[in-house]
Image (cartoon, coloured by chain):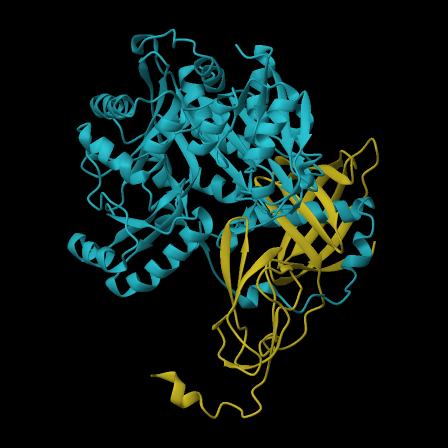
Chain colours: A yellow, B cyan
Amino acid sequence: MASRTFHVRVADEDLELEVLEHARATPDTPGTFVAAISGARLACRYRLLGPRDQVLELALELDGRTHRLLVAEDGRARLVAGLGASLRVEPGRARRGGGAGREPPREVTPPMPAVVVAVRVVVGQRVKAGEPAVVVSAMKMEATLAAPRDGVVAEVRVKVGDKVSPGDVLVRIDADPQGSADEAGGAKS
Amino acid sequence: MFERILIANRGEIALRIARTCRELGVRTVAVHSPVDARAPHALYADERVALPGDAPAESYLNMARLLEAARATGAQAIHPGYGFLSENGDFAEACAAAGLAFIGPPARVLRAVGDKLQARRLAQAAGVPITPGLLEPTGDAGALVAQAERLGFPIMLKAAAGGGGKGMRRVERAEELPEALARAASEARGAFGDERLYLEKCLLDPRHVEVQILADQHGQVVHLFERECSIQRRHQKIIEEAPSPGVDEALRERLCAAAVQVARAAGYQNAGTVEFLLDRDGRFYFMEVNARLQVEHPITEAICGLDLVRAQLRLAAGEPLGLSQADLTRRGHALECRLYAEDAEHGFLPSPGRIAGLRSPTGPGVRFDCGVEAGSEVPVHYDPILAKLICQAEDRPAAIARMQRALAETAVLGVATPLELLLDVVGSEPFRAGDTSTGFLARHFADWHPDPGRRQALLLGWLAAELSGHAGRAREAAAGAPAAADASPWHTLGRWRMEG
């Protein structure tokens, strides 16, 4: 059988999984496969114990130990839990050269559903990366969301009391049209 | 005994209370906010009453509606659980005025010990040592600064009305004090409606040790030994154990006697906890009284063989304790790990959402008090505790091994939990050695990351699901579609802090 390659993104890291051999599980027999991950060659055996309620349960044999795992879908991602750990597996992309110089995002967005308790910037204001932009509150906690980049506040889309979710753009920061002219003056005061 | 009680709480504690009620033949009335309409606690009870809104003020803090629900259902008593109205003197008083038994201490006691400063004065008067610091709260920043300078840094800034780790702020240096004072006062005003603060000197790397108390309405007080709750993040406990590995028999006797003294001085009734800090030299200092059932009460139940909720109901019904201190013994060792919906790898960020899948641990010596099930929503409005895992065994090493086994059996899909961190903490050398203190997590686990080996095993599990052909759209997702969501929260996230 030809090898198959999967590209996944796990904890902000793009990984390539190559399946070298595979015999699919049947109701009566366990499946087996050999995979290469980051240079390691791993042989596994698995039995399916589901799916039930959209959760697939499986017993994975690895290095002489059996682990019971749960797998579920979450949109385009997959969630896996077992061994006391859990993992979110997202669709990845094939590795390309030079991912280092990626542009920082322009938007301030909350990490979780939350309520805005303070807005610290106004449109037109010049900000530096790391400066407080919005304060949100959720589950009795407050978090200060910082400007992701140097620039000028182009848009403030929220006010105190708004309910916001991850992906919502609370504040947008554009590149400073005057460049970093006043940077030297503000740095060491 | 009561025929019917209302449980003014949600989640695992509401369920835990209802279970004991069922064993006692006491009927239960649950209350729930709209978002909790299908929550396990609401469905377990014999009856349920809907509360108008999701916000705590409209639901689990809504005194008028709770009292009305009790009246309408014919409940004779209200159990407040922990958090919410559990230590609210006005609510206890309103219950009494409505002819309902409040399952907890009376309003008079709640007010006396609920005011942390009054409690400090009370402990001092009872001859129990207290941490150096203020005995009166103040809204005067100048007075707080002067006191802080006299005590020396670091100091702990506390809201007069705070508790349970909330409204507390550690200040390391004098320069940080003005900003900390302003924020603490504003948070205290927002969270408690009382901006007064006080401060205490921080002990160097203390253990958090607390003593469980039971007191009847006839003047009898007993203790149920100590618990150690040193493993904390943001001043909130995540691992507790009983007995404390830092307390020997002689110290235990003094500590428990001090707790009973405080309880007597307060005229305490029902179940409560007297909290102490224990320094490296074996000196202990009274911290506060938690006038409620504690989250970590099951470890005391485990080593003492008692049901504290049953005791609470009996005591609230006016029954005598029916046992003396000599009747109380302890046996073996118990540990508790709290499962919050939070991301231990990213600063314990809250992680609300839907529980896609859940597997509970079971087997010998394992108790899993869980307020959610597969399909449950973890709402953004409330404290993010999901479940508590309690393991007991004949001694501490066996209890630790049991906890490791049970944590590894537990699986939660859909929201982040600190399960893996807990596993690494209980398996760590300093924890095994009993070398625990409130600085433990910061010292040993500040840079904690999930274990790559476990991660690899899970990745192989994902691959097995893909290869099995049962993973639905998994294959197309894995086929290399571009990653979405360019507005990533991790780029803009500042530091999360406990606010109130």
* Residue B212 in the figure: left or right of residue B363: left
Residue B369 visible here: no
Residue B68 visible to the viewer: yes
Residue depicted at 20% across the width and 27% down the height: B126
Residue B248 at what x, y percent from top left?
24, 25
* Above or below, A36 relative to B411: below
| Percent position of residue B87, x then y | 43, 33
Q: Nearer the viewer, residue B111 or B404?
A: B111
Query: Residue, x 34% and y 13% (percent of image)?
Result: B329
Query: Could you say where residue B164 lies in the image, as x and y percent from the top left?
Result: 41, 40
Q: Please state which of residues B63 and B152 is positioned toward the viewer in this rendering.
A: B63
Displayed quadrant of residue A163:
bottom right
Q: Nearer the viewer, residue A65 or B430?
A: B430
- Residue B135 x/y as whole percent: 22, 43
The residue shown at (59%, 49%) is B351
Front in this rendered view, residue B194 or B22: B194
Indicate whether B481 appears above or below B195.
below
Residue that protrudes farthest toward the front in the picture: B97
- Is B325 situated left or right of B85 in this image? left
Q: Is residue B145 above or below residue B426?
A: below
User: From the viewer's perspective, is residue B450 above or below residue B20?
Assistant: below
Count every numbered label the image shows and give the total. 0
Q: Quadrant of residue B476?
A: bottom right
